[in-house]
Image (cartoon, rainbow, N blue to C red):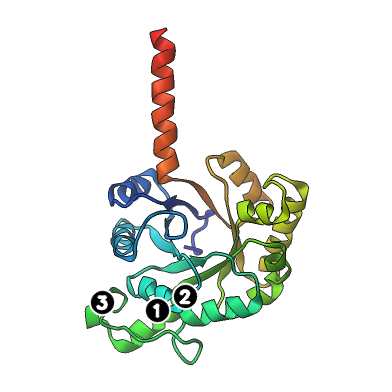
Amino acid sequence: MFTRGTTPVGTWLKIASAEPVEIMAYAGFDFVVVDLEHAPLDLRTAYRLVNSAAALGMTPLVRVPDRNPSTIQKILDAGAMGILVPHVDTVEQARAVGQACRFPPRGTRGAGGTSRAGAWGLRPNGDYLATGDDVLCIPQLESVEAIKAAPEILALDTVDAVFVGAADLSLSMGTTPASPEVAELITSAIDAAHAAGKRCGLAFGGAPGRAARAVRDGCDFVLLSNDTTMLAEAARALVTAFRAEES
C-alpha cells in the first residue's frame, strides 16, 4: 500500500455485500477499509469483503471496533493486510495494539497457520509467521491526548502509521474539523509521523480537492467518502435532477 509512486487513496466499506468492493476496484481505489466500528458488519462479512478486495488487487484493511486482541487476531487471520484501531490515546494502548498484530518475540499474536493468512495450512510456517511483520498497524488519533502522544506512539516499531480522526478529534475539543485548532493538531501529527519515518492519513468525505491539498501539505494516504454515502448522493442527485426537468 505504501510502495506506490502515487498517494494511496481508499474508501470505507459499510455495506454487507461484495458488489461495492468490486465497484471500488473498478473505480481505481488502491485500498478499502471494512468498517466494523461504525457499520453493522460482523466478522463473517468482513471475512468475505477482505477476500474480495484482495482478489481484485486492492489492499484490504479493517477498522476494528475496539482494541480487543482476539478481534485483531481473527481479522488478521482472515487475510486483512492491516488494521485501523479507533481511539488509541496513549503509548501504552498503542503498544498493546501493536503487540496484538505481531507474533512473538515482537508481540503476542497467536499462531493460526491453518487460516486464510496461512493459506489454510499450505503456506510454510516460516512464511506465515513472516506475515506478522508485513501487516499494517495503524492507530487512530482522535483526542488531544493522542496527538500529544504521537511521537511516542510512532516510535514503536510495531506501529506503521497513524490516522487522524478529525471528526472525533474536533468533537473532543468542542469545535469543528475545519477549525484552526484542529488543523494545527493535524499538522503536528503529520510532522511527528515524518520525523519517525512513518506515514499519517486523513479522511475527507466527498471532498477530493481538500484531500489533494492535504497531500501537498504532507498527508501520506487519504480516504474519500464511503459506499453508502456515494450511493445516497448519487440517488438524491438523480431524483433532484429529474424533478427539476419535470417542472
Instruction: Mark 3 or mark 1: name the one nearer the start of the chain.
Output: 3
Q: Amino acid at mark 1?
A: Thr
Q: CA distance from mark 3 to mark 1?
A: 12 Å
| Residue marked by disc 3 | 119
For the question of whether residue 82 can be seen, the reply is yes
Look at discs 3 and 2 and give the one toward the viewer: 2
| Marking on residue 73 | none
Measure how far apart labels 1 and 2 are at the Cα level: 20 Å
For badge 2, the amino acid type reads Asn
Element on which disc 1 rests: helix
Q: Residues within 10 Å of mark 3 (few under 14, many from 20)?
A: some
Q: Is residue 122 visible?
A: no
Front of the two marks 1 and 2? 2
User: Nearest the camera: 121 or 168?
Assistant: 168
- In the shown orientation, is residue 109 left or right of residue 45? right
Q: Quadrant of residue 173?
A: bottom right
Task: Name the residue rendered at 41%, 31% in the picture.
Answer: 234
Horizontal side of 70 relative to 119 (left or right) equals: right
Label 1 sits on residue: 131
Residue 59 placement, left or right of 17: right
User: How many marks on residues?
Assistant: 3
Question: Under tag 2, what secondary structure?
Answer: loop
Which label was assigned to residue 68? 2
Name, please, the residue furthest toward the bottom: 105
Provide residue 141's location: percent of width, then percent of height: 63, 64
Question: Earlier along the polypeptide chain: callout 3 or callout 2?
Answer: 2
Amino acid at the residue labelled 3 = Ala
Instruction: Report how far apart the C-alphas of labels 3 and 2 lie in the structure.
Output: 24 Å
